[in-house]
């Protein structure tokens, strides 16, 4: 395997797409072998790109034959780290927080929210999908005791930086941020901003173009 | 402007990032001129890529001087179609649906959910941020009367295709799908799948690597 630091971010972001697609083929469609062309075709990714992405991580598949679906799925899953379960805390028990706790497809990705925090007395003590909402003051203790590395932020933008600071102080190493604001974190802490507004704009762009051209 | 069909998808997906960044500089930071290097730097995009992306849409900025922030923001906003308001319907008044209706940053992107539907009698009639949840049976009438082109799906995976079909039949042209399943739609209908599980995997990948290397 090449040094992971030199692998393009775009490649890393395509791995989960490959994984989900392979998992679907393996689990539901009983496909045994797949070519880079077919795998790419299902995801709108050119076959040359599929082969290049996978080549960063080693030799998979056989020229002229294709990839064994189950083997490749397990290999990609291992690269991604989804072959084990990653516990996460979530701060912000509003609608979005509740939606995330209830979101069904995370389990397949090895991701499990095990603790939910809020600072709102009206929310503390409520139960979301078997998890009781705890006071934010309990965060450091819970993170340290369970050695949790992953935190999800679903609080309003103005509260997000403070929550991020508390997470990092407690030992969280990776933050999934749903608050529409940029977070400042020390080196070595990974942040992924999930900016929902970006998604809608690509649709608006297409609608806008359709109206313009009358198509 | 080049034929929009030939513009790479990745370019289109970067436009909203430019727009948000320019809007922030223009509105809050009172920046008047920005170079492609500075704009790219804020977004981790190489300056050559910034210039290439914008060049698809015309001539902006002056060599050696940079872009006028306010002008470029308005130009990009116009390209994206966010200079007007796009009404949308949402189907699925669960936690995620409620979170989306309440999400603050959509307005800036010209996106507004004006009608919410569900088929659950316990949800119909509830009010989410001033909107009363309507029965799904009213969907066709509402879409046609208001000429709504944009639909958001936040129902469970197994119900999503049926909802998509109803939207398309009623006249919706672009679907933002939060259900973790692939939708089949006729040609000319644009779908954007917002697969939340993909986001978490890139974080898990980094954590997994950190543990492996002990960094």
Image: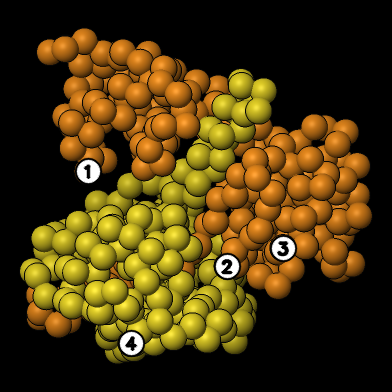
Chain colours: A orange, B yellow
* Coordinates of residue B123 in the picture (x, y in percent): 59, 70
Label of residue B71 in the image: 4
Question: Element type at marker 1?
Answer: loop
Residue at the disc numbered 1:
A44
Within 10 Å of disc 1 (Cα), the crowding (few <14, some 14-19, many 20+) is few
The answer to whether marks 1 and 3 sit on the same chain is yes
The total number of labels drawn is: 4
Q: Earlier in the sequence, mark 1 or mark 3?
A: 1
Q: What residue appears at the point 74 percent right and 68 percent down from the top-left corner?
A: A159
Residue at the disc numbered 2:
A180
Q: Determine the chain carrying the residue at label 3.
A: A
Q: Earlier in the sequence, mark 1 or mark 2?
A: 1
User: Relative to residue B204, is residue B174 drawn left or right?
Assistant: left
Q: Determine the chain carrying the residue at label 2.
A: A
Task: Please say if B179 is above or below B14.
Answer: above
Q: What residue appears at the point 81 percent right and 53 percent down from the top-left corner?
A: A166
Residue contact at pointers 1 and 3, CB within 8 angstroms: no
Q: What residue appears at the point 77 percent right and 55 percent down from the top-left corner?
A: A165
Residue at the disc numbered 3:
A161
């Amino acid at each position: 395997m090449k040094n992971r630091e030199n692998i393009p971010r775009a490649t890393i972001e395509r791995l989960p797409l490959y994984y989900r697609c392979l998992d679907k083929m393996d689990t539901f469609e009983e496909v045994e072998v797949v070519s880079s062309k077919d795998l790419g075709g299902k995801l709108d990714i050119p076959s040359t790109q599929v082969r290049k992405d996978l080549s960063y991580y080693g030799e998979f598949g056989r020229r002229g034959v294709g990839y064994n679906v189950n083997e490749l799925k397990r290999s990609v899953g291992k690269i991604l780290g989804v072959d084990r379960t990653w516990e996460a805390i979530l701060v912000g028990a509003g609608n979005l927080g509740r939606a995330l706790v209830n979101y069904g497809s995370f389990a397949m990705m090895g991701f499990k929210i095990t603790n939910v925090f809020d600072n709102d007395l009206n929310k503390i003590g409520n139960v979301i999908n078997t998890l009781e909402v705890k006071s934010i003051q309990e965060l450091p203790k819970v993170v340290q005791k369970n050695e949790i590395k992953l935190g999800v932020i679903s609080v309003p933008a103005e509260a997000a930086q403070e929550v991020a600071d508390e997470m990092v102080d407690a030992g969280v190493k990776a933050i999934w941020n749903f608050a529409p604001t940029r977070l400042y974190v020390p080196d070595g802490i990974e942040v992924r901003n999930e900016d929902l507004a970006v998604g809608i704009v690509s649709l608006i762009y297409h609608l806008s173009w359709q109206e313009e051209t009358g198509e």
